[in-house]
Amino acid sequence: MSLRDRLHKVVASQDELEADEEREQAVRQVGCTPVAQLDNRSRASVSGVIRSTTLRPREGVPALEAELYDGTGTLDLVWLGRREISGIAPGRRLRIDGLVCLVDGRRTVFNPRYELRPRPGE
């Protein structure tokens, strides 16, 4: 580890350290694209950690929403017709595949294919 890296770890905030960790984890996932580099209407694989989940009906249909964070940005995941999905919870690592689109200016993937990844320390 270089002197610059050590100095960064000493003066960085907790949020910066967590972002660094998430970026490192995402880079290790072969074939994954950082959220910050996702284009509208593109197919992508993304790896990150779920920050929050919400049950929010969309046009009268139940929808489970999750915010995925990879250290470069956030991606909204929406599963239509679902009230809950076992394993989809804050703190869980996830790899998703799907079509990225912009909804109200936010990167979103509807009904992504997903793979649950081990939590830190597992």
Image: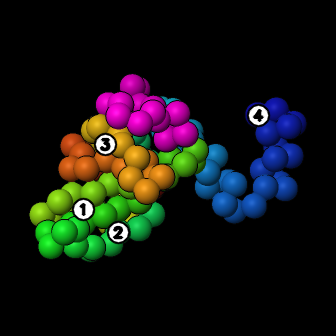
Instruction: Give the label, 4 or 1, closer to the camera.
Output: 1
Residue 36 among magenta residues: yes
- Name the spot of residue 94 as percent of width and height, x first: 34, 49
Question: Mark 1 and 2 residues: CB-CB less than 8 Å, in contact?
Answer: no
User: How far is disc 1 from disc 3 in space, using C-alphas?
Assistant: 14 Å
Q: From the viewer's perspective, is residue 114 above or below residue 77?
A: above
User: How far is disc 1 from disc 2 in space, using C-alphas?
Assistant: 11 Å
Return the mark for residue 1. Answer: 4
From the image, tell me which residue sits under label 2.
53
Mark before the other along the chain sequence, 4 or 1: 4
Which image quarter: residue 63? bottom left
Looking at the image, can residue 91 be seen? no
Q: How is the image coloured?
A: rainbow
User: How far is disc 4 from disc 3 in space, using C-alphas?
Assistant: 31 Å
Element carrying mark 2: strand
Mark before the other along the chain sequence, 4 or 3: 4
Return the mark for residue 87. Answer: 1
Return the mark for residue 96. Answer: 3
- Name the spot of residue 5 as percent of width and height, x first: 79, 39
